[in-house]
Image (cartoon, helix red, strand yellow):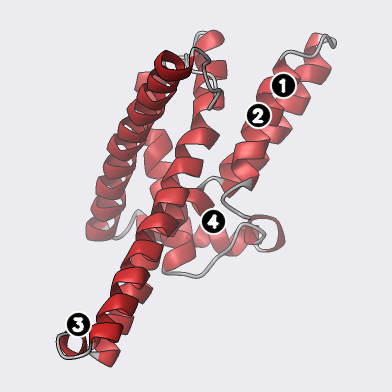
Amino acid sequence: MLAVIPVALAYATLWTSRIPLMRWPRRIMIAALAAVWIAFLPNTCYLLTEWRHFLFLIDVRDLYVRSQADAMLLVRLTALSVFYFLYSGFGMLTFALAIRPMEHLAAKRGALVWFWGLPFFTALSLGVYLGLILRFNTWDLVSRPGHVWAAIVQVGGRPFLAGFILAFGVFLWIAYEAVDVWIDGLTDRWGRVTGRRIHLGPKA
């Protein structure tokens, strides 16, 4: 559910940008929706980290070693692998679908999307770190903003951690572009096969 929320917020922001309202009320609504969107967005790519539970189970219960002599356990291990693959895949799909409308809106308003790519995805990487390691959640931005800000400031004093967060941000950027291309390819193939184009988010 938390991964779907930013997708809904992205489309709500895009829809709001097209409402024939006065300029300033519309801008305030867009800014508010975008702020909530960016707060929830790390919940999408966070699902990539759920593989740690899979690896923990394999290690603690020796699932792989035991499956060599137990055919049913091998089936269960395979099913568990497929589950985690689909689980993380769902996270990356919602990740891309939540960004595409906002990228479209930013490009339409003349923003240099490529220029803001690195700081944007690094910020998302930082959000994943805050949730995964320090166990903050989205609501803490409102209920404990001081604690969240203090944790962010501390990252600046830890070069190795800051570098790792930056590297993961680059990975997220590459992963987004890959899924983005896959979505474009899927919509194009579907349109050529059926004569109708499916709509998986506007593209700039």
Looking at the rendered image, the disc whose residue lies closer to the viewer, 3 or 1, is 3
In the image, residue 6 sits, relative to residue 60, either above or below, namely: above
| Residue 85 spot, x, y in % from top left | 35, 58
**Helix, strand, or loop for circle 4?**
helix
**Helix, strand, or loop for circle 3?**
helix
Q: Residue at x 66, y 42 (%)?
A: 36
Badge 1: how crowded within 10 Å, few (<14), some, or many (20+)?
Answer: few
Looking at the rendered image, the disc whose residue lies closer to the viewer, 4 or 2, is 2
Q: Amino acid at mark 2?
A: Tyr
The answer, for residue 153, to whether it is visible in the render is no
Disc 1 to disc 2, how far (Cα)?
6 Å
Disc 4 to disc 1, how far (Cα)?
31 Å
Residue for badge 4: 149
Callouts 4 and 1 close, C-beta under 8 Å: no
Q: Earlier in the sequence, mark 2 or mark 3?
A: 2
Q: Earlier in the sequence, mark 4 or mark 2?
A: 2
| Residue 44 spot, x, y in % from top left | 49, 49
Q: Earlier in the sequence, mark 4 or mark 1?
A: 1
Badge 2: how crowded within 10 Å, few (<14), some, or many (20+)?
Answer: many
Looking at the rendered image, the disc whose residue lies closer to the viewer, 2 or 3, is 3
Q: Earlier in the sequence, mark 3 or mark 1?
A: 1
Report the quarter where the N terminus lies: bottom right
Looking at the rendered image, the disc whose residue lies closer to the viewer, 4 or 3, is 3
Left of 60 or right of it: where is 195? right
Residue for badge 3: 64
- In the image shown, does 8 or 23 lie closer to the viewer? 8
Residue for badge 2: 11
Callouts 1 and 2 close, C-beta under 8 Å: yes
The answer, for residue 86, to whether it is visible in the render is yes
Badge 3: how crowded within 10 Å, few (<14), some, or many (20+)?
Answer: some
Residue for badge 1: 15
Callouts 3 and 1 close, C-beta under 8 Å: no
